Amino acid sequence: MDPIEAKLAELGLALPGAPVPSASYLPYRMNGTTLVLAGVISSRDGVTTHAGQVGREQTVDSAFQAAQVCALNTLASIKAALGRLDRVREFIYVAGYVNAVSGFDQSPQVINGASDLFVSLYGERGRHARAAIAVAGLPRNATVEIQVTVTFD
């Protein structure tokens, strides 16, 4: 078994199926040894798991969980692209978007749901540069969306 998937199992987590694009875009692009992944929202099997704005329908804690769902979707896309999760050399960049009420200033705490999982699974290779941005809305009223860039062997 892929050692990263074994770590996921130890955490009580499992990969979902890879998200299917819902519009005119690709799920990922490769350029040399760089993999750029399309944004993924907090959904599983096409159903939104966390919907609504943080500060209204969602809390920081539930949004943290939504970011973890996004991270799992990202990992599923990585596996679809590379065949194995352990081919990732390092996470380069994570852009995190949080559907939140006006003035919301805790986006970094929310996006830690994704960042913390990547570091738990990959150690130092999982550390990355990042943006965590509050926005007025996301596709399907999802609570969180992330976009990730990694390098691979």
Image: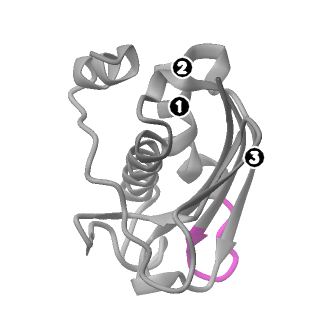
118 left or right of 36 in image: left
Do residues under tags 3 and 2 come within 8 Å of each other at their CB atoms? no
Give me the disc on residue 118.
1
Say if 36 sits above or below 152 in the image. Answer: below
- First of labels 3, 2 by sequence position: 2
13 left or right of 153 in image: left
Point out residue 89 in the picture as x, y percentages from the top left corner. Answer: 65, 22
Q: Which residue is mark 3?
A: 130
Point out residue 17 in the picture as x, y percentages from the top left corner. Answer: 26, 53
Of tags 3 and 2, the one toward the viewer is 2
Q: Quadrant of residue 102?
A: bottom right
31 left or right of 116 in image: right
* Amino acid type assigned to the residue bearing label 1 in the image: Phe
C-alpha gap between disc 3 and disc 2: 16 Å
**Main secondary structure found in the magenta portion:** loop
Point out residue 74 in the picture as x, y percentages from the top left corner. Answer: 47, 49
Q: In front here: 42 or 132? A: 42
Do residues under tags 2 and 1 come within 8 Å of each other at their CB atoms? yes
Look at the image and give the residue range highlighted in magenta: 98-105
